[in-house]
Amino acid sequence: MKKRNILILFLSIFFFIACSEDDNEEECINYDDVAKVTNVEAPATATVNEVVSVNVTFQVKNACGEFAQFDESIDGTTRTIAVEAVYEGCACAQVITTKTATYEFTPEVTGEYVLKFQTAPNEFIEKTITVEEAGSSS
């Protein structure tokens, strides 16, 4: 009877330890965060009612980070833009990675458009694009 009790005790401890280790094997994440914009490539000029494409380079905090969307606020011809990254996955390598996404907008009036891409709270990379009517030349 003693051998049986010792065996049950041993197996109980074994299963407890085995289950505890499995719980800590992988930590999975799922959240959104504002990414740091590091570079912006924009044209100097554009045409009314034509799509303007701007290449935006940004950093994600780990290997599971991906582009989610652009968050923008518009005030006249000034646009303040933040890149939102999504972090989703398990066993994400802790390495800062650079990604690129294309921001697009279609100007509806002529003038100077100022694009302010957030690099940090209250810090921006600014690009000015002069928008003209089709067929205009400077």
Image (tube, helix red, strand yellow):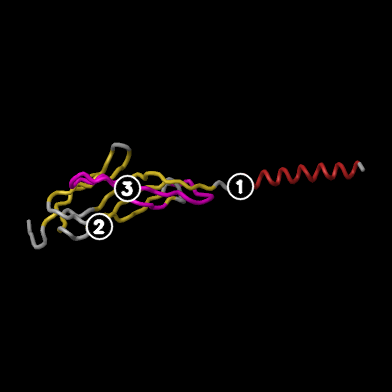
Magenta-colored span:
66-95
Image location (x, y in percent) of residue 51: 22, 59
Which residue is the site of mark 2? 53
Q: Position of residue 8 (x, y in %)?
A: 83, 44
The answer to whether the residue labelled 3 contacts the one labelled 2, judged by CB atoms less than 8 Å apart, is: no
- Which is more N-terminal, label 2 or label 1? 1
Residue beneath disc 1: 25
Q: Observer-nearest residue: 9 or 92?
A: 9
The amino acid type, in three-letter code, at marker 2 is Ser
Amino acid type indicated by mark 1: Glu
Alpha carbon distance from label 3 to label 2: 16 Å
Left/right placement of residue 20 relative to residue 4 reads left
Residue to which mark 3 is pinned: 71
Q: Nearer the viewer, mark 1 or mark 3?
A: 3
Residue extending farthest to the top is 122
Q: Nearer the viewer, residue 95 or 79?
A: 79
- Measured as percent of width and height from the top left, residue 72 is found at 29, 47
SS at mark 2 in the image: strand
